[in-house]
Amino acid sequence: MGNARGVLYGLAFGDAYGYPTEFLKVPEILRKFPPAGPEDLGNVLVSDDTQMALAVSRALVRAEKLDVETLEPLLRQEFIEWANSEENTRAPGMTCMRACERLEKGLPWVKATEMGSKGCGANMRVAPVGVLNLPVEMRSGLAQFQAALTHGHPTGLAASDATAQAIHFLMQGMAPERVLQALLDYAEAQLGLYHHDWLGSLWEESQHPAAAYFIARGWRETMDALLRVKEAMKSPDFDTDPCLLTGAGWIAEEALATGLYCFLLHPEDPRAAFKRAAVTSGDSDSIACLTGSFLGAYLGDDGFPQEWFDRIEYRDELEKMAAKLPLLQA
C-alpha cells in the first residue's frame, strides 16, 4: 500500500525522468535517449513541478489549522519565495509567475489568480494534499484552493481535486483497475458543488451566472478527459505516444488524464511507466510527475529502486515533508 514518502518521491522521480524530454518531439527524444527512451533515472534534477509541490508541502506543515484564513498567507509566501528563488530556473509556468507577481503586490488572491488558465501548474503540485488523511470535503476544498491561487479556471480546480482524490484512493488500497471508474463517479457527485468556504467569491470573477455553473464546467471537462482514458484503456497501446490518445498535458485535465493513463499501463513497473510518460510529445515532466505520484500512492516507497532515493535532488526536504505530512489532522 502506498504512503506519503512514496507519493512525494514518486513525483520527484517522475519529474526528473520527464524534465530532459519536455519540449521535445518523440523522434528527438529517441535520438537523445536511444534506442527507445530513458531506461533509468539518469537525470536527478527536477523541474518547477517538484519545487512547487514542496512549496505546498511547507505551507501545509506550517499551518496550525487547515482553513483559508491560515493557509492563504502561508501559500502566498511560499509561492512568492519560489518565484523569486535563485533556483527558479527550470522553465517555470508563465501562469504561475504572473499570478505570483500579483500576489507579491498584495492583491487579494481572487484578483491575483489567472482566471482564464487551466494550466497543469494547478495540479502538478497538489500531491501533498492527496496524502493527507482528511474528510473528503476538506480534501476537495483544499485541493481546489491551492490551485486557485494561481489558476482560477474551474477545470484547473476540478482536475486538481480529482488528482488528489486519485492519490487518496490508491493510498487506501484501491486496485488500479478500479480507480478510473471511481474518479468518474466522484466527478459526477461533485457537479455543481462549489466550496464557498474555500473559494469565496472566485466564481464572480468569471462569466458564469452562478457558482454551481462555474464549477460544473470544470468537472465536465475533467470527466471528458477521464472518459478518453477509459476509451484508451479498452485497447491499451504500449507504443503510441500517449499524448495522441489522452492529451498533451499542458492543461490540467490532460495532465491528469495522460499521467493516469501512463500509470494504468504499467502500475507495477515504475521504470516502464516513467519511460512511457517521458517519451511523449507534450508536457513530459508534468505528465511523469503525476504518473509518479500515482505509482507512489499505489506501491509505496518500496516500489522504487532504492538507489534513486539517494540521488534525487531535494532529497533532504522530500524526506522531511514525507515524515511531517502524515501527522497533520483536520
Image (cartoon, helix red, strand yellow):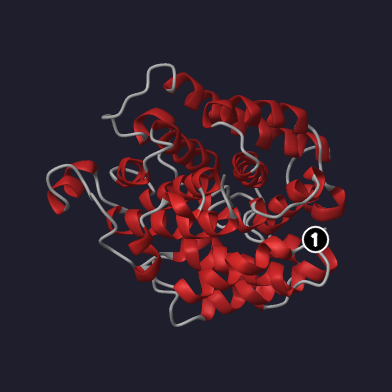
Q: Nearer the viewer, residue 31 or 213?
A: 31
Q: Quadrant of residue 90?
A: bottom left
Q: Quadrant of residue 212?
A: top right
Q: Can you give x and y, in whole percent of width and height, for residue 273 in the image? A: 36, 41
> Label 1 amino acid?
Gln
Q: Is residue 1 above or below residue 52?
A: above
Q: Is residue 153 above or below residue 89?
A: above
Which residue is located at x 33 percent, y 55 percent? 17
> Callout 1 environment at 10 Å: few (<14), some (14 to 19), or many (20+)?
few
Which residue is located at x 37 percent, y 36 percent? 243
Which residue is located at x 20 percent, y 48 percent? 29
Q: Circle 1 sits on which residue? A: 329
- In this rendering, the count of numbered labels is 1
Q: Is residue 2 left or right of residue 208?
A: left
Which residue is located at x 58 percent, y 26 percent? 178
Q: Can you give x and y, in whole percent of width and height, for residue 189 in the image? A: 76, 29
Q: Is residue 6 above or below residue 219?
A: below
Q: Is residue 38 left or right of residue 262?
A: left
Element marked by disc 1: loop
Q: Is residue 279 left or right of residue 268?
A: left
Q: Is residue 19 left or right of residue 5?
A: left
Q: Please say whether residue 31 is visible from this viewpoint.
A: yes
Q: Nearer the viewer, residue 261 or 75?
A: 261
Q: Please say whether residue 200 is visible from this viewpoint.
A: no
Q: Which quarter of the figure is the N terminus placed in?
A: top right
Q: Which quarter of the figure is the C terminus placed in?
A: bottom right
